[in-house]
Amino acid sequence: MLLACVVASCGGAKSDDGASRAEAASTKASRSDSAGRDSGRAPAGNHVVLFIGTSLTAGLGLNPDSAFPQLIQQKIDSAGLRYEVVNAGVSGETTAGLLRRLDWLLRGTFDVVVVESGANDGLRGTPVATVERNLRDIVTRIRAAHPTARILLAQMEAPPNLGNQYTSAFRSMFPRIAEESEATLVPFILDGVAGIQQLNQGDGIHPNQQGEHRVAENIWKVLEPELKRLEER
C-alpha cells in the first residue's frame, strides 16, 4: 500500500503539462498590489490558498476540475470563506525540483500554502537527510518571503521495499520539520485511498475522482480550522 502511495506522486509522463498548469497558477497568484506582496497577504476579499505539490496535487489523469485542490475550493465556497485556491502542482517533482522553482512561486501572494512534496524522493531512495534538508529549506524560504502566511506540510510515505529503517526515518521527518518550523502537519493525505482499487485509476496508483474526494476530505479536516482562524483576525 505504501509503495502505491509513493508511486502516486511520480507521474513524470505528464510533467510538461503539469509545469504549464503550475506556471499559469502561479501567475494567477501574483495578481496582487505591492502592499500585498510586502505583507505576504492577498488583497482584502481575494485571499489565496496556494497548493504546491506533485502529480497528486496536479491531478494527474483527471480533469483539472476534479483534482483535490479544486474540490477544496468547492468546500471553501460552501463554507462561505473568502479564499481562492491556486493549484501549482507539477507531476514528477522532487524536493530539489521544488527548490529550483520556489523563488518564482514566491513572487505571488498567498495567505496559506499547502506543501505536498517528498514522495518522489522516497521512491528514488534519496537519502532522508537530503530530503529533510530540502524540505527545511522550502519551509524556511516560504517563511522568509511570506512571514504572515500559514504553512501546512503534508505527511508523505516511502515505499516499504527500501527497508524499515529508511521508511521509519522518512515518516518521522515530516512531524519533526512541522514542529520545529511551527508549520501545521497534514496527516498522510492518501489515508483511506492508497491500495483501495475502487478509489484509484486504472494504473492502481493515482486516485480517481472518487478517491480525490477522500483526499480532499483528509486535507480539509486540517485546512478548514486554519482558514476560519485567519478569517477571525
Image (cartoon, rainbow, N blue to C red):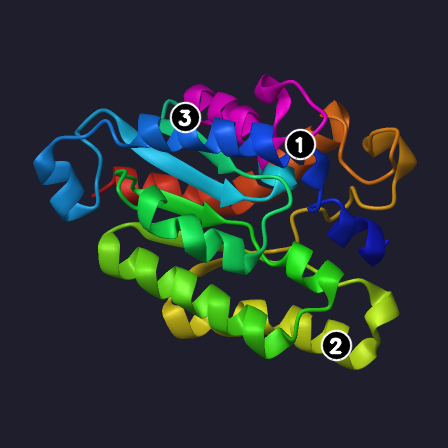
- Which residue is farthest bottom? 165
As helix, strand or loop, the secondary structure at mark 3 comes to helix
Q: Position of residue 165 (x, y in %)?
A: 77, 81
Please report whichever mark, 3 or 2, sits nearer to the chain's N-terminal start: 3
Magenta region:
58-79
Task: Tell me the residue that label 1 is attached to.
Answer: 14
Q: Residue at x 88, y 29 (%)?
A: 202
Q: Place residue 139 in its image quadrant.
A: bottom left
Q: Is residue 30 left or right of residue 98?
A: left
Task: Tell me the residue that label 3 is attached to.
Answer: 24
Question: At label 3, which amino acid type do we have?
Answer: Ala
Q: How many marks?
A: 3
Q: Is residue 141 above or below residue 62?
A: below
- Which residue is farthest left? 35
Question: At label 2, which amino acid type do we have?
Answer: Tyr
Q: Are marks 3 and 1 in contact (CB under 8 Å)?
A: no
Q: Is residue 31 above or below residue 111?
A: above
Please report whichever mark, 1 or 2, sits nearer to the chain's N-terminal start: 1
Task: Tell me the residue that label 2 is attached to.
Answer: 166
Q: Are marks 1 and 2 in contact (CB under 8 Å)?
A: no
Please report whichever mark, 3 or 1, sits nearer to the chain's N-terminal start: 1
**Distance of mark 1 from mark 2, alpha carbons?**
28 Å
Q: Position of residue 188 (x, y in %)?
A: 66, 54
Is 138 one of the magenta-colored residues? no
Few, some or many C-alpha atoms within 10 Å of disc 1 (few <14, some 14-19, many ≥20)?
some
Dominant secondary structure of the residues highlighted in magenta in the image: helix
Question: At label 1, which amino acid type do we have?
Answer: Lys
Q: Can you tell which of label 1 and label 2 is closer to the viewer?
A: 1
- Which quadrant would the C terminus be assigned to in this image? top left
Q: Position of residue 117 (x, y in %)?
A: 56, 54
Few, some or many C-alpha atoms within 10 Å of disc 3 (few <14, some 14-19, many ≥20)?
some
